Amino acid sequence: GDSVTQMEGPVTLSEEAFLTINCTYTATGYPSLFWYVQYPGEGLQLLLKATKADDKGSNKGFEATYRKETTSFHLEKGSVQVSDSAVYFCALSDRIDYKLSFGAGTTVTVRA
Amino acid sequence: GAGVSQSPSNKVTEKGKDVELRCDPISGHTALYWYRQSLGQGLEFLIYFQGNSAPDKSGLPSDRFSAERTGGSVSTLTIQRTQQEDSAVYLCASSLGLVNSPLHFGNGTRLTVT
């Protein structure tokens, strides 16, 4: 079945550092790919998405590019802030039943 | 506007008791999902509703778990004869039910079975 594997955490880094969270997927067909974020004390919310190969999703300074050849959707941000501290989840949708399959989540802590 | 609302936010119950978890989706959202988030685990899919129908119940862990949705709105997840391994955060999400529609999540119900 469809699955997502993402980089294990936790990740701790300093403000203004570069952040990468790796995500790879296994799917039949052509899934849509998502990154969701869960800030402390809040519910999960969509961060960005890409619906076809070579699409780049971006939001709040974060970017991820849908790479079909490497089945990857790595999340990047060039200069993180303390407010980016959260749990990040990579997810895919097989576009048949709209069910999202999530990775295990990566906890990111940014220190001032 | 109002988001997805889940109640209760916390529930502590004794092993063997039944529990009901409630989800109020965003008005107009036809699709509703239940996930389970255990400590150190990802989000485990439980069940999905399109309207009042559940085309995919494949994620329900056992026959102790059931869910229903009435009026295309509120959904209830019921766990009978709870076990300690049922302890987790149960998340509900809703969406417009279209391809690539984002899921809007509630804050979850934290269930602790003692």
Image: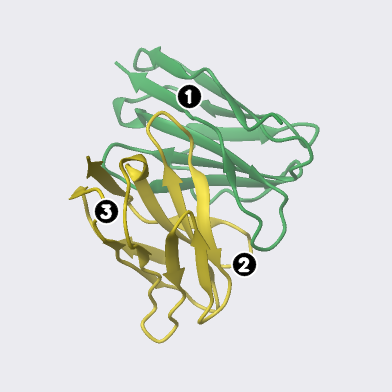
The quarter holding residue B88 reads top left
Circle 3: residue type: Glu
Within-10-Å neighbours for mark 3: few <14, some 14–19, many 20+? some
Q: Quadrant of the C terminus of chain A?
A: top left
Q: Is residue B66 above or below residue A105?
A: above
Q: Which marked residue is nearer to the observer: mark 3 or mark 2?
A: 3
Kindly indicate whether the residues beneath marks 3 and 1 are on one polypeptide chain.
Answer: no
Per the rendering, the mark at residue B80 is 1
Local SS, label 3:
loop
Of the numbered discs 3 and 2, the one sitting upstream in the chain is 3
| Chain of the residue where label 2 is placed in the rendered structure | A
Image point (43%, 17%), residue name = B10
- The chain that appears yellow in the image is A
Is residue B40 visible from the viewing direction of this image?
Answer: yes
Circle 1: residue type: Gln
Picture coordinates of residue B53, whole percent (x, y): 73, 45
Is residue A2 visible from the viewing direction of this image?
Answer: no
Picture coordinates of residue A48, whole percent (x, y): 52, 59
Picture coordinates of residue A110, whole percent (x, y): 25, 44
Per the rendering, the mark at residue A95 is 2
**Foreground residue among B83 and A88:** A88
Picture coordinates of residue A36, whole percent (x, y): 46, 51
| Chain of the residue where label 1 is placed in the rendered structure | B
**Foreground residue among A83 and A94:** A83
Kindly identify which residue carries mark 3.
Answer: A16
**Foreground residue among A70 and B17:** A70
Q: Quadrant of the N terminus of chain A?
A: bottom left
| Chain of the residue where label 3 is placed in the rendered structure | A
